[in-house]
Image (cartoon, helix red, strand yellow):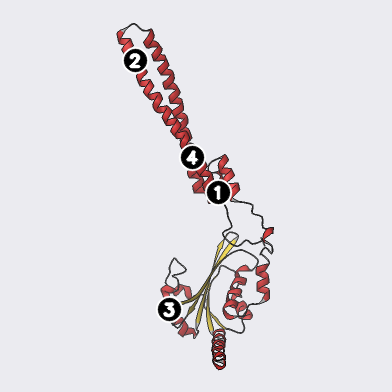
Amino acid sequence: MKYRFFYIFYIISLLFSNYNNQTYLILNELDIPDLDINQKFIDNFDYLDLQFDDLIFNSFQKVDSLQNFISSNMAQVKELGLFYNVNYILYNKIIQNEGRFNLKSQLYGTRSGGLIKERDVDLIDYFNGNINEIYLWIGELTGGIKNEWKENRNSILFPNIDEIVYKKTPIKSALRSMILPGWGHFYSNKKLYALIWFTSELSLGIISYLSFRNYQNSRNSYLLNLELYHNSNNEKEVANYRGLAEQDWENHKMYSELAIFCVKIIGVGWITNTLHAWIVGPRPSFKIYKKW
């Protein structure tokens, strides 16, 4: 039993040591104006055999999705492995988004051409954060993470969660929508929802106002025709005023019911709009970081 344990431990150690000594071809799609970027990788990972090809993307089949980028080119991955005599291809792509950046990385084995491991991180754009995150990724793969890379990452993290102050919250969003429909959604940067809620409540409000005004006009017209009906002795006039009064009565009932219905819908919509503003209100969708 003891020998079996040491044998298993030896095999695992051998596998990990072989994995760390494997050769890598690094493909970078980075929007970073640094001519020495490849040399920085070599300097920081001198224990690895790294090769680079920044022009290879011109020969790859173009696809929209990162997940399908190299999986649609498995044959090319195998060919690259043979051409560069490497065991792995590491693909890194940086997508800048205002004050944040998204790092998408994938590790492929050239023997099968398949995906082995992938990483997708979304971070605030801190100083040299793009390169630092790739350093951490490669270090994680090969077991060579340096403390300075961790310190660079930790410098933007909140050490204490109690220090985090959320400037925008779902409650603030709901309170705004309670005051004015759509305001909370606009506050949460949900502009389409804001437009829908504001225009729907405004439209119902206009319909309610017009219905109430028509109700008043029909009511006044009914009272006038009723008075003329009672004061007239002419048979034709009596019949005419009676017909007008009956029509005004039906109109006043219709507009009254329509106004009441619209007011009810506005009330329900107002409450629903407030709840919806809370549901879609601003919440931290990523880990919270300090500004650099």
In three-dimensional space, the C-alpha distance between marks 4 and 3, rounded to whole angstroms, equals 59 Å
Residue 67, above or below 288: below
- Nearer the observer: mark 1 or 3; the answer is 1
Mark 2, secondary structure of its residue: helix
Residue type, label 3? Gln
In three-dimensional space, the C-alpha distance between marks 1 and 2, rounded to whole angstroms, equals 54 Å
In depth, the one of 289 and 258 nearer the eye is 258
- Residue on which the image places disc 1: 278
- Relative to residue 261, is residue 92 drawn left or right? right
Quick one: which residue is furthest to the top in this view?
233
Judge the density around disc 3: few (<14), some (14-19), many (≥20) Cα neighbours within 10 Å: some
Q: At 30% across and 8% down in the image, what residue appears?
A: 235
Quadrant including the C terminus: bottom right
Mark 1, secondary structure of its residue: helix
- Residue on which the image places disc 2: 242
In three-dimensional space, the C-alpha distance between marks 1 and 3, rounded to whole angstroms, equals 49 Å
- Relative to residue 39, is residue 29 drawn left or right? left
Q: Position of residue 244 (x, y in %)?
A: 35, 17
- Residue on which the image places disc 3: 76
In three-dimensional space, the C-alpha distance between marks 1 and 4, rounded to whole angstroms, equals 16 Å
**Where on the picture, by quarter, is residue 234?**
top left
Task: Compare marks 3 and 2 and give the one earlier in the sequence.
Answer: 3
Q: Can you tell which mark lies on residue 207? A: none
Q: Position of residue 17 (x, y in %)?
A: 57, 87
Judge the density around disc 4: few (<14), some (14-19), many (≥20) Cα neighbours within 10 Å: few
Please indicate, yes or no, whether residue 78 appears anywhere in the rendered image: yes
Residue type, label 1? Trp
Please indicate, yes or no, whether residue 38 appears anywhere in the rendered image: no
- Residue on which the image places disc 4: 268
Residue 238, above or below 249: above
